[in-house]
Amino acid sequence: MKLSEGVEQGLHCALLLAEAPAGVPLPRRVLAEHYGLPEAYLAKHLQALTRAGLLRATPGPSGGFRLARPADEITVLDVLEAIDGPASPFVCQEIRQQGTGAARPEECTRPCAIATVMVGAHQAWRESLRAVTLDQLVKRVPQTLRKRNRAKFGSDPAA
Amino acid sequence: MKLSEGVEQGLHCALLLAEAPAGVPLPRRVLAEHYGLPEAYLAKHLQALTRAGLLRATPGPSGGFRLARPADEITVLDVLEAIDGPASPFVCQEIRQQGTGAARPEECTRPCAIATVMVGAHQAWRESLRAVTLDQLVKRVPQTLRKRNRAKFGSDPAA
DNA sequence: GCGGCAATACTCGGATAACAACTGTCCGAGTAAGTAAGG
DNA sequence: CCTTACTTACTCGGACAGTTGTTATCCGAGTATTGCCGC
């Protein structure tokens, strides 16, 4: 089992967008250079985030990506499932019903015990990620770094 | 992210070994036919479980695999990490320290906030799997099926 | 000076290759059982 | 009848291809800006 690296890239970009002043779109080129990531590959993930309704993309000059919702209404789980897909890593193949020792249908009224355990673990994992929002992550970024980023992208008229 | 199907196969086989009377080795051929699985592929996973010290393999006629420890001392997490590897699905690439917006070393005294969240979720997932033992899973198998399996492999002199 | 228009440059979006991991398979080394011969 | 050595068949173990998913990349469609021309 290996989590896509695009998830980490997407999370960092979403976090940076949450740091930047609202209403200031950041193009993918800026995002890629800011973190030293391959731009063309990052595009795929930003696109996934846009399709999921987390980001809003605007084309043309001075365009780019910005958060579609307030940072405190976007959880880490949202970003992760938008990029990696919402499918559970474990899918029960109903092994118990196959082969010479197959269980009969009337013995399978309850779901497979193994699948139940795996689903429970997956839920615990999801809950742990759902409990953290982008806004909370921003607060954990060192203030010196936050100020630097804000000065870099800032220039927002509202300030 | 996708969990190897070998994990499910290994779990079912370990569960069946826990159902069978202790001291009666089951060859991989029997295990494969019992669940309708490809024998040669299953061998790879049983080998991994053996290397991890969960199973004990005995060669020669009337040989096979048996649990190396009591069923209540083997957790689902043990089986899973033996087959899938103990590596975390998320590995921090330290993106924050790369690119034009790289954070300085003195700003990285604390671990990356994103990595912290991911590690926490992974721990929650592991704890959920560590809490369940093979013995507990056996008790959730329908009694009719347990009896059938025991009669199939049983013939243990202790009965 | 102002409005409209066209050219421009910048943005995102989907379709296309290269790589890696998982899946599936095979044959060889080793061992315990079974058998037959000898005592 | 018991012991012993051998033959046999069955087991696991590691090395070898096929297929799916992830990683990486490119070029085309669309749009807001910008400069220019006409009024």
Image (tube, coloured by chain):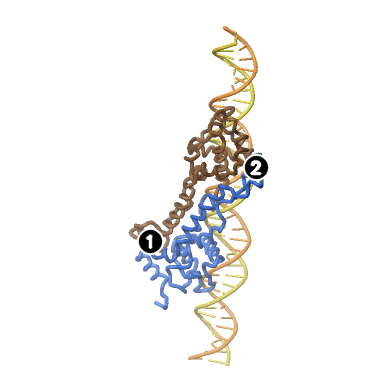
Chain colours: A brown, B blue, C yellow, D orange
Residue C21: x percent and y percent?
57, 53
In the structure shown, which secondary structural element does the residue marked by tag 1 occupy? Answer: loop
Q: Which mark is residue A21?
A: none
Q: Using the image, determine if residue B41 lies above or below residue B21.
A: above
Query: Observer-nearest residue: A24 or A61?
Result: A24
C18 sits to left or right of B118 = right
Quarter of the C terminus of chain B within the rendering: bottom left
The kind of residue on which mark 1 rests is Ala
Q: Which mark is residue B102?
A: 2
- Badge 1 local density, few (<14 within 10 Å), some, or many (20+)? some
What is the distance, in whole Å, between disc 2 and disc 1 at their CAs?
Answer: 57 Å
Foreground: disc 2 or disc 1: 2
Give residue A11's quadrant in the image: top right
Query: Observer-nearest residue: B129 or B151?
Result: B129
Query: Observer-nearest residue: A47 or B159?
Result: A47
Q: Which residue is mark 1?
A: A103
